[in-house]
Image: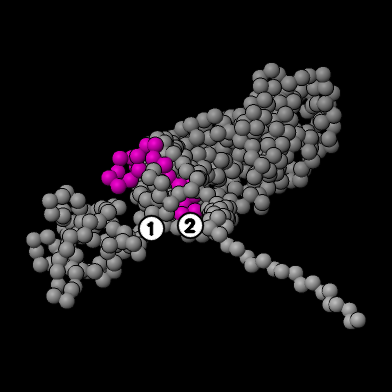
Amino acid sequence: MAKKNKKIVKYRRPLQINIGMIIFFLVFLYLAFYVYQYCTRVKVQPYEVTEGAIAGDRNFTGIILRDETTEYASQSGYVNYYIREGKRASVGTSIYSMDETGEAAKLLEENTASEQLAEEDVISVKKALSSFSLAYSDMDFSQVYDSKYSLEAMVMEYANFNAASTDEQLAAQLGGNFSQIRTPVSGVISYSIDGFEGVEASQISESSFDRSQYSRAITHAGDLVEQGTPIYKVITDDNWSILFPLSESDVTDFHDLTSLNVRFPGHDLTTDGAFSIIVGADGGSYGKLDFDRYMVQFISERYLDFQVIMDVAQGLKIPVSSVTTKNFYLVPVTYLTTGGDTDQEGFNREVYTENGTLVEFVPATIYYSTDEFYYIDTSEDSAFHAGDYLVKPDSSDRFQIGQTASLQGVYNINRGYSVFKQIEILAQNNEFYTVKKGTSYGLSVYDHIVLDASAISGENQLIYQ
């Protein structure tokens, strides 16, 4: 008998779609889309507007110019000073001695080995260290070496100040190999020589402020010097000046001022200086501050950091990152009107129909105004577009929309969507603006604005925080 075919074919049940599955699928799509939107949308961080002030202080680095007379060594030998840095000497005062053999230094060392610095000298050194600490900046490390040289010179002078009392003994022992040098003019003594002695204000240029090329020489007591070497200088006048470069904005802000209030942070000093603007050797604009006091406090310095104290601007304080610009149409103020029985402001616009030209009232949002123009929106959602004609109230005069201008402002998000608000900046620093308070179309205290304006694409954007 033939075998029976025992092959079994499985029965596939048809897919049954019911209303429950459809609802579940739609809910899944909705949740997936919502999660995707949440993960990819830009998060907007708000900022609450507060009242505040920004001091418009400006920081500068200037070059000090004085009436300086450089004196040179009349012979070769070992030098020993009698006058301290920054002290005033009259005509004929012994400034230093010159020893051709070097024996004077040994005798002085024997006479002063057991002596210590006087208390007032120690206080002066501490003040110099304190001034350096207050003015120190990592961005200007070269001033460490300048201060080191100044302190070395100061200690040397203090240690050898009493040497003048042994002059007669040294002269007797050394004979013609020892001589004293006296100053031919009166003034304040300094031992720092840097090549700026005798430089006029009109000779200053941008290269003068290149600290990397700056150097100065200080001859220490006991050093061997050659004849003709610059050995000290005399500042013959208490009047001194600071020259500093000005940017275009500085020139605009300072051009009508004759005096500036300045602060020297490293010296805990604030004073007024006569101000003028000069043209340097390179044709650039430079500020010039003239003083008749405090010259001695800066005797060892050539470059000086200082602040110009400006008026403090009171207003609303907002971050720099919140500010953006936006273009607007300009419409003459004489074209503004109100619509019908309401007090809503807007403009009469020409509308072209099959039956002819009609004039209709269109409400408008005013963003800013001047004596001549109102600023209205230019976005695609605006009721007004370039080429539209407006009709002047109670007149046949027409104005075609097209002229634009930009405004600085921020995006207000009080209502959950972005609204542009114009601002008037009064002062600024690196982080904040102070803007005018109480403007007709601007901000108020406690308004919420977008912290980063670049996160907003335009007006009426919904805000997700």
Please tell me which residue lies in front, 434 or 124: 434
Tell me the residue at 48%/57% (across/down). Answer: 284
Q: Farthest left residue?
A: 394
Instruction: Estimate the x, y position of residue 323 in percent, counting from the top left.
Output: 44, 50
Relative horizontal placement of residue 136, taking residue 204 as reference (left or right) = right
Say if residue 205 shows up in the picture: no
Which quarter of the picture shows residue 257?
Answer: top left
Say if residue 136 shows up in the picture: yes
State whether residue 88 is above or below residue 100.
Answer: above
Tell me the residue at 66%/52% (across/down). Answer: 213
Is residue 357 within the magenta segment?
no
Instruction: Estimate the x, y position of residue 119 in percent, counting from the top left.
Output: 69, 17
Is residue 454 within the magenta segment?
yes
Please tell me which residue lies in front, 199 or 24: 24
State whether residue 324 is above or below residue 378.
Answer: above
Overall secondary structure of the magenta stretch? loop
Q: Residues within 10 Å of mark 1 (few under 14, many from 20)?
A: some
Callout 1 amino acid: Lys
Q: Which residue is mark 1?
A: 326
Q: Which residue is mark 2?
A: 284
State whether residue 4 is above or below residue 27.
Answer: below
Tell me the residue at 14%/72% (across/down). Answer: 357
Callout 2 amino acid: Gly
Magenta highlight range? 436-456
Distance (Cα) linking label 2 and label 1:
35 Å
Instruction: Estimate the x, y position of residue 31 in percent, counting from the top left.
Output: 56, 53
Please tell me which residue lies in front, 334 or 150: 334
Relative horizontal placement of residue 344, taking residue 89 as reference (left or right) = left
